[in-house]
C-alpha cells in the first residue's frame, strides 16, 4: 500500500469546507460527481456522474464533524480501477488563521495511488476555486487581465493594419 496526501488553504471558515465535503449536492469540484447517500458512519455512498452512472462506491468509516471524514472507497468508472482493492481516503479540516486547511490523504495499491498522485492537486485546487472567495477573486482578476491584454493586442494589430 502506498500513502500520500495533499493540502490546500481556504480563506473560508472550516464549517464551510466541511459542508463542501459532506454535501449531498453535486460536487462540481470533484469530477462533477453527486453523492447518493448520507455521510454517516457505516453508511454507503454511491458517487454518480452527470448521466447517473456510478463512478465510485464508498463506505463511511468515520465521521467527526466538522473535522474528519474517512471513506473506504472503490473506483468503478473503469475496469482497471474496479478490479483494485478498496482504498482509504481521509479528509481533515482544521482552522488556520481566518480560514482553514483541508487535507486529503489516501492509502491505496499502486494503480489507485498513481491516480491520486496525478489528480490530487487538481482536486484540491478545484475545491479551493469553488469554495474560497479569495480564489474566485484571483480568477476574476486573472480573467479580466487576460481580456484586457487580449483587447490591447487586438487594438495594436488593428492600428497597424
Image (tube, rainbow, N blue to C red):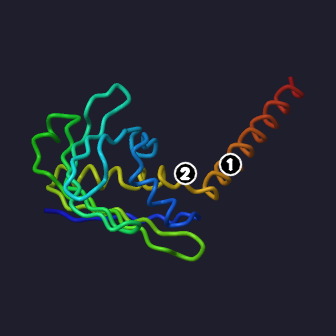
- Mark 2 closeness class: few <14, some 14–19, many ≥20 residues within 10 Å: some
Picture quarter with the N terminus:
bottom left
In the rendered image, the residue lying farthest to the top is 161
Q: Which residue is drawn at 76% across and 41% down?
A: 149
Specify the quadrant of the image occupied by residue 52.
top left
Picture coordinates of residue 134, whole percent (x, y): 64, 59
Q: Which residue is drawn at 29% across and 53% down?
A: 116
Residue 89: assigned label: none
Specify the quadrant of the image occupied by residue 76.
top left
Eyeballing the image, is 97 above or below 153? Answer: below
Specify the quadrant of the image occupied by residue 68.
bottom left
Picture coordinates of residue 60, whole percent (x, y): 23, 55
Q: Which residue is drawn at 58% across and 57% down?
A: 132
In the rendered image, the residue lying farthest to the bottom is 97
Residue beneath label 2, please? 129
Element assignment for label 1: helix
Eyeballing the image, is 31 above or below 139? Answer: above
Q: Residue at x 85, y 31 (%)?
A: 155
In the rendered image, the residue lying farthest to the right is 159
Which of the two discs, 1 and 2, labels the residue nearer the N terminus?
2
Residue beneath label 1, please? 142
Would residue 5 be found to the left or right of residue 21 on screen?
left
- What's the distance in space between the residues labelled 1 and 2, CA to CA? 13 Å
Picture quarter with the C terminus:
top right
Are the residues tagged 1 and 2 within 8 Å (C-beta)?
Answer: no
Amino acid at each position: 500500500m502506498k500513502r500520500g496526501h495533499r493540502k490546500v488553504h481556504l480563506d473560508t471558515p472550516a464549517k464551510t469546507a466541511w459542508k463542501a465535503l459532506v454535501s449531498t449536492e453535486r460536487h462540481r469540484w470533484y469530477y462533477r460527481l453527486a453523492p447518493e447517500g448520507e455521510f454517516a458512519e457505516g453508511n454507503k455512498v454511491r458517487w454518480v456522474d452527470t448521466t447517473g452512472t456510478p463512478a465510485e462506491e464508498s463506505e463511511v468509516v468515520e465521521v467527526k464533524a466538522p473535522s474528519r471524514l474517512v471513506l473506504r472507497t472503490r473506483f468503478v468508472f473503469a475496469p482497471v480501477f474496479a478490479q483494485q482493492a478498496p482504498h482509504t481516503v481521509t479528509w481533515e479540516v482544521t482552522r488556520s488563521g481566518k480560514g482553514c486547511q483541508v487535507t486529503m490523504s489516501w492509502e491505496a495499491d499502486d494503480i489507485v495511488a498513481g491516480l491520486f498522485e496525478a489528480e490530487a492537486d487538481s482536486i484540491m485546487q478545484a475545491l479551493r476555486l469553488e469554495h474560497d472567495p479569495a480564489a474566485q477573486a484571483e480568477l476574476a482578476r486573472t480573467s479580466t487581465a487576460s481580456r484586457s491584454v487580449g483587447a490591447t493586442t487586438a487594438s495594436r494589430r488593428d492600428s497597424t493594419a
